[in-house]
Amino acid sequence: MASLPIDTAKFTGIICAVPPAPRVANRETGQLRVDRETGKTVYQVGLCLMAGGSADVVNVSVSGEPVGIQLGMPVAVRDLVATPWENDGRHGVAFRAAEIRPLSAPASAGKGAAQ
């Protein structure tokens, strides 16, 4: 099925609800999921997507470990896509991003200014 791009600029906030963890490909062997294109381990991060008066938590996959992401931290997400799926009568939506990184704190306006 086709991947649907999501405009993250429309959200009023995106916060880490579940810290990054490697995705497991085979529960019996413990083998981790690896991105076919990059060869990097795929991580899953629970993100709280806030818009207006509502919020939803979704699990987002990303290639490579997102560095510096902690529980409750505001984050920036690049190239978020949703892909509907169906398998043996089960169905859902898988979310994937090119990058998840800590949101930079704005520089303090008064810092270093002459008084």
Image (cartoon, rainbow, N blue to C red):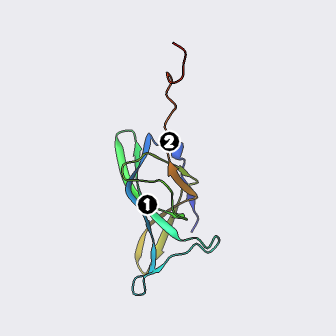
At a point 51% along the width and 24% down the height, the residue shown is 109
Name the secondary structure under disc 1: strand
Label 2 or label 1, whichever comes before in sequence order? 2
Residue at the extreme top of the image, as rendered:
115
Q: Residues within 10 Å of mark 2 (few under 14, many from 20)?
A: few
User: How far is mark 2 from mark 1, CA to CA?
Assistant: 20 Å
Residue at the extreme right of the image, as rendered:
37
Dot label at residue 10: 2
Q: Is residue 4 left or right of residue 22?
A: right
Q: Is residue 16 left or right of residue 111?
A: left
Where is residue 80? Give x, y as percent: 54, 55
Q: Is residue 31 left or right of residue 55?
A: right
At a point 50% along the width and 33% down the height, the residue shown is 106
Q: Residues within 10 Å of mark 1 (few under 14, many from 20)?
A: many
The residue mark sitting in front, 2 or 1, is 1
The amino acid type of the residue labelled 1 equals Val
Q: Which residue is mark 1?
A: 45
As displayed, is residue 54 above or below residue 58? above
As displayed, is residue 39 above or below residue 76? below
Where is residue 4? Give x, y as percent: 56, 58
Where is residue 6? Give x, y as percent: 54, 52
Marks 2 and 1 close (CB-CB < 8 Å) = no
Q: Between residues 81 and 110, which one lies in front from this camera angle?
A: 110
The amino acid type of the residue labelled 2 equals Lys
Where is residue 89? Give x, y as percent: 40, 78
Dot label at residue 28: none
Q: Is residue 102 left or right of residue 54?
A: right
As displayed, is residue 83 above or below residue 102? below
At a point 45% along the width and 64% down the height, the residue shown is 44
